[in-house]
Image (cartoon, rainbow, N blue to C red):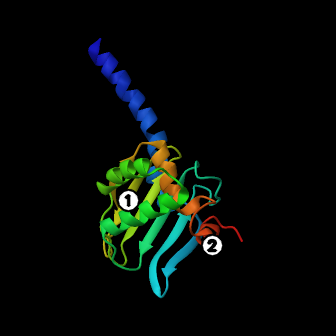
Amino acid sequence: MGDLVRTGLFACLLMLFPAQAEPMLNWRQWPSVGNASLSWLWFDIYHSTLRTPDGVYLSEAAPLALQIQYLRNISAQELLDATREQWQKLGYSKAQIEVWLLELSAIFPSVEEGDQLVYVSAGEHGRFYFQPQGQAHFHSLGHISESTLNRAFIAIWLSPQTAYPKLRRQLIGAS
């Protein structure tokens, strides 16, 4: 009886896993919704691309991939500081921001010019992928399972209250 139960559980997991993993695995084949670059004064910071399964942006809750190619070297701490600043501007509480930053500090790498960082959201959770310049493959950095953190991270770029509304409009394909 124990083997039969284990076999049944394994079969259920196999049936469930592709449905949950599919958005995470296929993001590179998704069409682009829009592209945008962030510059500050005369410094180019990054070039970003928003992808969705059908190439149309519906909402922050729908599956999407935010792909960022860095145009300069940025330390992990600088990425965390910039994330903190954007969340403060979006009105999240200081206590909540610090909890989220602690989680992200275990995930964020330092990036160099040409590196790519991708956040793929399945709607309620997401995963970070990283591809250093000159390497052929992306590798997983970490998973976000908390839906509130998932939405807050995406909000930095896609919220109507973002600090960069022009960048948002370009990413979501709005004119």
Name the residue nearer the viewer: 163 or 117: 163
Q: Residues within 10 Å of mark 2 (few under 14, many from 20)?
A: some
Residue that carries the numbered disc 1 in the rendered image: 129
Q: Residue drawn at (39%, 31%), measured in percent from left and top?
A: 13
The residue located at (48%, 59%) in the rendering is 88
Return the mark for residue 166: 2
Farthest top residue in view = 1
Q: Identify which residue is drawn at 33% across, 23% down.
A: 7
Using the image as rendered, state which of residue 159 and residue 65 is in the foreground.
159
State if disc 2 and disc 1 touch (CB < 8 Å): no
Camera-near label (1 vs 2) is 2
CA neighbours of label 1 inside 10 A, class few (<14), some (14 to 19), many (20+)? many
Question: Residue 12's image quarter?
Answer: top left
Residue type marked 2: Lys
Q: Is residue 167 left or right of residue 142?
A: right
> Which numbered disc flags the more N-terminal residue, 1 or 2?
1
Give how far across and how far down residue 73 sits, in percent. 33, 77
Q: Residue at x 58, y 48 (%)?
A: 61
Which secondary structure lies at badge 1? strand
Camera-side residue: 175 or 31? 175
